[in-house]
């Protein structure tokens, strides 16, 4: 019996070994994902002495299995006995940090960074720091790239002697022969700089930053630009000009467009890091050059930062800088040959109106907005329309209507239905900005015209648009302005337009309320039950079911039910079906509210 107990105690590890050696990858993956359960079954001591050595020796599997293992080990601290024994997790994670697959290495480094915080300062020097050194000195580039992500987590908690060794290892990796290692070092340069003492930032990090920013590989140089933001925030203002700006100027004019793109993408962060004086003297000319760059990707990235850059300029001469240096470049970008550049600019250009004020907006920005509203690219036009409220706040509704509204109306009648659809979606926003009087005068006719568009998606969107407009302007406005025109379409010769009347009534009944629905809409719906087209008749049944909850019970009983009873005997199968659907709905008090599974039985019984 004792022997049997002994066998039982070995069972969990035996199952794990068996499953990990199974040919089925999914089985091995499932086994790895259950490691915590197996570790609990084994206990902390056997997990340390049996499970972890086994895992360390068997790291040869598929990448997805190794990825799961690297993730699991990051949460294993308590399963090996707590922080006192957390160093037992280092051997398998060290092995995982050297594999060829990048995602596995990254996950192993993430887990190592996590458990480094659980080491005591003594254990960090005895166990963790030697691991970092081994990785940094490894023969394969994979281990050296992983080491780059570990320096910053152990540096603050080790002795001065060990700190010096860590700095030396990082310097070595920054000049490694393998570009992948230099890339990894460059990506962690800013992070490492944040944990260093200021003197070492000046003496060590700046020289490394300069070297990496001049690397022969553009993939290394562009990562150095990211580090520039972190380094600039650490240095006193008086040191920036001599230690950082020469390298940043060089990056902004780099021969590789990818490096210039990174400068443009990080420009606002760089601007905040270096302060107003350097921005005025150095960054303004650099930003001008990026807006005029020969590569469209760089121009698009810079254009996307125009508003943010202008907002962060020093207030005392902000307007002068924008009008003199930035606006001429912006005017050129409005007619750029690349649609991505124009679209990026259109998404932010409206924000300049609040910065420059009413007079400058009317004189200089409105012509640009108008040009973009007429751009052949739909995305450019939509980016302008979606930000009209910015301009409205600055120049007022009258000026806006005289300048931009004709272009909006032109778009609303565009030959491409997707352009018309996009304008419809912005109409409630425009209505709210322009007010009811202006809307009735300029845009009401347009909204009604969309209801008889030849494209169904336009008619559907126009119906939703009416509902949103009524929500903004109220039921009284709807009764006087919208409802009569909608109900007039019930006599249209085109059955599609008659159906649109029903769709509008469905949408408007809730927002217009019981009185308007009962007195004006319901009689029209009931009359349409005699339409010659079956599609119209079954939509009458659906409409009666939809507006039923708005009506009084007596109206349902005396007016709605007789019509539905008649439709339930219609010669068309679809009309009969939807009539029975409406009769069985809960809006009609005289009917039994049947479950869905019974509705078809009711329909068949009626036939």
Image: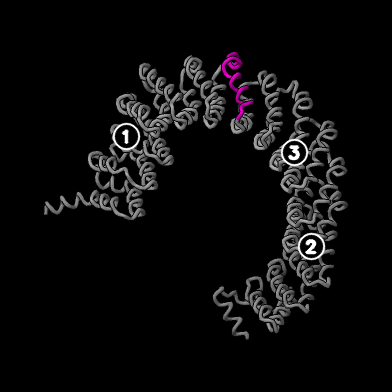
Q: Quadrant of the C terminus?
A: bottom right
Observer able to see residue 582: yes
Q: Sort mark 1 into few (<14), some (14-19) or many (20+) by Cα contacts within 10 Å.
A: many
Q: Is residue 150 left or right of residue 464?
A: left
Residue 513 at least partly seen: no
- Quick check: 23 left or right of 445? left
Q: Which residue is mark 2?
A: 453
Part of the protein shown in magenta: 237-255
The Cα–Cα distance between marks 2 and 3, rounded to whole angstroms, is 34 Å
Query: Considering only vertical position in the picture, is 156 above or below 31?
Result: above
Q: Nearer the viewer, residue 565 or 170?
A: 170
Q: Nearer the viewer, residue 241 or 540?
A: 241
Q: Which residue is mark 1?
A: 90
Q: Secondary structure at mark 3?
A: loop
Q: Give the structural element (helix, strand or loop) at label 2.
A: loop
Taking the spot 60% from the left edge, 23% from the top edge, the residue there is 248
Residue 512: percent from the left, percent from the top?
Answer: 76, 61
Instruction: Please rate how many residues cluster around mark 3, counting C-alpha atoms within 10 Å: few if below 14, some from 14 to 19, many from 20.
Output: some
Which numbered dot is residue 509?
Answer: none
Give percent across and percent down for residue 598. 56, 77
- Residue that numbered label 3 is attached to: 336
Q: CA distance from mark 1 to mark 2?
A: 68 Å
Quadrant assignment, res 127: top left
């Amino acid at each position: 019996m004792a022997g049997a107990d002994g066998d039982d105690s070995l069972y969990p590890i035996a199952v794990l070994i068996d499953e990990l050696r199974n040919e089925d990858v999914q089985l091995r993956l499932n086994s790895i994902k259950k490691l915590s359960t197996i570790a609990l079954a084994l206990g902390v001591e056997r997990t340390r002495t049996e499970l972890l050595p086994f895992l360390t020796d068997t790291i040869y599997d598929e990448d997805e299995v190794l990825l799961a293992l690297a993730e699991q080990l990051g949460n294993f601290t308590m399963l090996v006995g707590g922080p006192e024994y957390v160093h037992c997790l280092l051997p398998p994670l060290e092995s995982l940090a050297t594999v060829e697959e990048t995602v596995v290495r990254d996950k192993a480094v993430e887990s190592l960074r996590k458990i480094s915080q659980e080491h005591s300062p003594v254990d960090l020097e005895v166990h963790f720091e030697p691991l970092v050194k081994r990785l940094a000195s490894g023969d394969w580039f994979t281990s050296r790239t992983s080491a780059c992500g570990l320096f910053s987590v152990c540096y603050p908690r080790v002795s001065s002697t060990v700190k010096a060794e860590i700095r030396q290892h990082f310097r070595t990796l920054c000049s490694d022969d393998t570009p992948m290692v230099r890339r990894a070092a460059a990506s962690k340069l800013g992070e490492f700089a944040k944990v260093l003492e200021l003197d070492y930032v000046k003496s060590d990090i700046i020289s490394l930053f300069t070297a990496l920013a001049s690397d022969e590989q553009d993939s290394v140089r562009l990562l150095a630009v990211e580090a520039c933001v972190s380094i600039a925030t650490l240095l006193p203002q008086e040191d920036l000009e001599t230690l950082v700006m020469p390298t940043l100027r060089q990056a902004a004019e780099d021969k590789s467009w990818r490096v210039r793109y990174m400068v443009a993408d990080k420009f606002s962060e760089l601007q905040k890091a270096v302060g107003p004086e350097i921005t005025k003297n150095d960054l303004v000319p650099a930003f001008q050059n990026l807006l005029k760059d020969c590569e469209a990707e760089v121009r698009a990235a810079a254009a996307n930062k125009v508003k943010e850059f202008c907002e962060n300029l020093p207030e005392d001469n902000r307007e002068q800088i924008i009008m003199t240096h930035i606006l001429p470049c912006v005017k050129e970008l409005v007619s750029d040959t690349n649609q991505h550049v124009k679209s990026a600019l259109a998404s932010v250009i409206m924000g300049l109106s609040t910065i420059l004020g009413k007079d400058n907006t009317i004189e200089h920005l409105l012509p640009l907005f108008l040009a973009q509203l007429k751009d052949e690219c739909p995305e450019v036009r939509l980016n302008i329309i979606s930000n009209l409220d910015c301009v409205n706040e600055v120049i007022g509704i009258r000026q806006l209507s005289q300048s931009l509204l004709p272009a909006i109306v032109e778009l609303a009648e565009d030959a491409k239905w997707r352009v018309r659809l996009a304008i419809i979606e912005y109409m409630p926003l425009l209505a709210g900005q322009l007010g009811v009087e202006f809307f009735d005068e300029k845009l009401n006719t347009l909204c009604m015209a969309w209801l008889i568009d030849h494209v169904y998606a336009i008619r559907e969107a126009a119906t939703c648009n009416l509902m949103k407009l009524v929500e903004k302007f109220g039921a009284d406005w709807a009764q006087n302005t919208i409802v009569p025109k909608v109900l007039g379409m019930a006599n249209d010769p085109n059955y599609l337009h008659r159906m649109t009347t029903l769709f509008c009534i469905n949408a408007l009944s809730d927002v217009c309320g019981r009185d308007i629905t009962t007195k004006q809409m319901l009689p029209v719906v009931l009359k349409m039950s005699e339409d010659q087209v079956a599609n119209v008749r079954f939509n009458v049944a659906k409409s009666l079911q939809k507006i039923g909850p708005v009506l009084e019970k007596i109206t349902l009983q005396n007016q709605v039910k007789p019509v539905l009873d008649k439709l339930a005997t219609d010669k068309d199968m679809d009309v009969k079906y939807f009539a029975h659907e409406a009769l069985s709905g809960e809006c009609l008090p005289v009917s039994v509210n049947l479950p869905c599974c019974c509705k078809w039985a009711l329909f068949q019984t009626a036939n």
